[in-house]
Image (cartoon, helix red, strand yellow):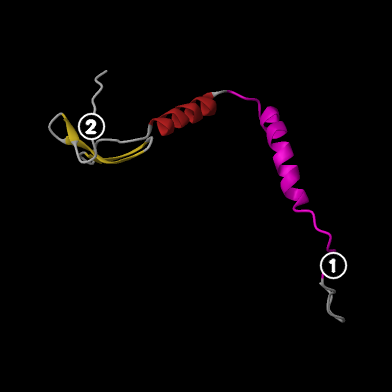
Amino acid sequence: MLILQRKAGESLVIGEDITIRVVSVDGTRVRLAISAPEDVSILRSELVTATAANRDSAMEETAPVELLDLLGGVLDHKREGPKSSLKTHAPAAPEGKED
């Protein structure tokens, strides 16, 4: 691993077509500008990690009953809806009309 020190406004070049420029440094936060060809994927490391974890969990074999148990609490909570002290009544059907 190569470790470099750069100040705001300075840059570094990777290969012939990737440039990384330090835009600003504010305390512990560093803003970078990256110039690269469109076919080069640029992702934050936490997104790569989350994508890999999501892919791994999607490949796990889980019985449908277990998935339903996991979703059961979520679905039951959504059916209950928010608690309200106001009572609501369905509108009465117009007189003389039957379905």
As helix, strand or loop, the secondary structure at mark 2 comes to loop
Residue 9 against residue 89 in the figure, above or below: above
Which part of the image, by quadrant, shows the N terminus?
top left
Percent position of residue 21, x then y: 22, 38
Circle number at residue 89: 1
On the rendered structure, is 95 left or right of 42?
right
For the residues bearing labels 1 and 2, Cβ distance under 8 angstroms:
no
> Distance from label 1 to label 2 (Cα)?
67 Å
* Amino acid type of the residue tagged 1 in the rendering: His
Number of the label disc, if any, that sits on residue 6: 2
Query: Residue at 37% across / 37% down in the picture?
Result: 27
Q: Secondary structure at mark 1?
A: loop
State left or right for residue 9 relative to residue 81: left
Q: Residue at x 12, y 32 (%)?
A: 16
Name the amino acid, label 2. Answer: Arg
For marks 1 and 2, the one nearer the N-term is: 2
Q: Residue at x 75, y 43 (%)?
A: 76
Q: From the viewer's perspective, is 50 left or right of 94?
A: left
Question: Of 69 and 25, which appears nearest the observer?
Answer: 25
Give the left or right position of residue 64, taking residue 30 as reference.
right
Q: Residue furthest bottom?
A: 96
Q: What percent of the width, then of the height, locates residue 60? A: 56, 23
